[in-house]
Amino acid sequence: MTSPSTFRLRLEEIDTEVAALRARLEELAITRTDVVAQLERVVYPRVLDVPIEIMSQIFLLCEGSIRIGNTDLAQDVPFVLASVCCRWRALALSMPELWNTFKVDSTWHESNEEAAVRKLELCTERAGARRDIVISLLSASKLEVIVPMVAPTVGRWSRCEAYEGYLERFLQQGQRFSSLRSLTMRHQWDCKATSPLSISAEDAPLLRHVELNQIDGIGLPWAQLTKLSLSDSLDSDKCVTVLSLATNLEYLHLEFTMFYRYPLLSRSAQRLKLKRLHTLSLRWKSECYAAAINFFDLVILPELRSFTTDIPHRAETGQREVTTIKNMLARSECGSNLRFLTLYFLGYSNHGLPFTQILATTPILERLTLPNLSKEDLHSVLHVLTSGVCDTRIVELCVEMQHHCIPFQSLAVFVSGQLEQQSDGDSIGFRCLKVFVPPKAREWYEERNRSGFEMLQHLAAQSGGPQIYVTNYDATPLIESTSQPKPPKYSWYL
């Protein structure tokens, strides 16, 4: 039996060991503090000593609008940068472009009115005399307070996004948008114009880019616009009338989502020739199919170089649209100019015939973009491209998959076939393949074809061969040509 003295002796040994460990911990804590201090002396001054030219570019990459109605300055990037240290504050205050982007939205509260006025005055003062203010007016309440507050800055706006009601108020006050180059006008039932809204060339002499989600009762200097985006509630005949006035358009985006509310184009509508248009994007929902067909039947686009559209899910309507597009391209005589083609296949189950008809209109494509494809869709498309039926030469193919299942074998066969068709010294040949699986892609069990994967990987590693870039849903590269710079994440199809 162990005696009490034995336990006491053991307890003393434990206490002695604990005391030694505590002393060691205190020693390590002091050492750690010294190391942290040394690290701060070595590293932090190097961050602060980054050349002003580089630091200013870093500041400009810190995106974010100044929310006028929000008194929490910690949510506004310019104020945060100006609060780090004296050097950063001096730099931030010397950069007027850092203070020229304002936003008035649903965060606006009546109790913040005085603070909001002071905040806007401070920011416009720091923005200097520059006439490049970017402003967003998307608060449907308290117009009687907001309009007078921002009115002194109207002549300095270069870009504006606003509800109709704001623009009407400014025009009623005799304001001119003398520096405005880009306008996004939003239609909101509780902040709409009370009468037809008309902005003349004298009101906005520099206006070139406009985005609208409805055109009823809207008058703009259409003839001076070079970029126009129309969406949602579009009256067919009014849309054509607007386009006939926009004689200098170079870029047009149409999104037919609520066309069924209006009648289709009048049968008497004349051909619409847009002589300078080089980029057309026409997106639509299934109920707007007839409106899209009528538009293709109407237009002549001799300078078209970039074209984006949808192909419907039903075979008969898909065939009809493809034929209409083919006729439009032939009528426009723009096949030799077309360089960029983006097709959204809306579940269409047999892409071969219509896909071939579209490609047959152009001999060379610098980029063919196919978003939202299933594995079966991509199989069909690659079969068309490798069957010899299509003579179009494709320099770059960009594909976005619906799910995680990538047909590596078909991709490898396609790339190999493209390389076999090229002759030595060919300046126009296949140069790039990009396959992306976006983060929100549908879950799908993937049984990767090992031989196809290795074959495509081998092609990507070849010196002087095509650039191949395949990413997984988490943006990690599965296959990447070593000489290829990594492209911006998922921005290739925008």
Image (tube, rainbow, N blue to C red):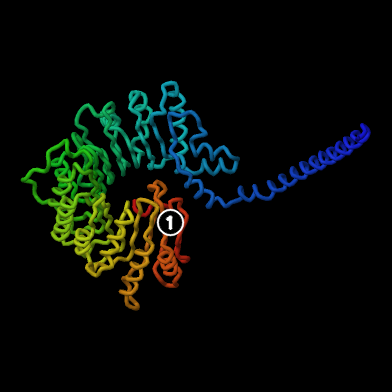
Residue 322 in sight: yes
Viewed as shown, does residue 232 lie left or right of 13? left
**Residue type of the residue flagged with mark 1:** Thr
Where residue 445 sits: x, y (%)?
Answer: 41, 52
Viewed as shown, does residue 215 lie left or right of 486? left
Instruction: Name the residue rendered at 35%, 27% in the picture.
Output: 148
Where residue 294 sits: x, y (%)?
Answer: 13, 48
State the residue in front, 14 or 136: 14
Where residue 247 sits: x, y (%)?
Answer: 18, 50
Disc 1 element: strand
Say if 188 sits above or below 420 in the image.
Answer: above
Residue at the outermost front position: 1
Say if 310 sits above or below 178 in the image.
Answer: below
State the residue in front, 133 or 103: 103
For disc 1, the neighbor class at 10 Å (few under 14, some 14 to 19, many from 20) is: many
Residue at mark 1: 471
Q: Quadrant location of the N terminus?
A: top right
Viewed as shown, does residue 70 lie left or right of 377? right
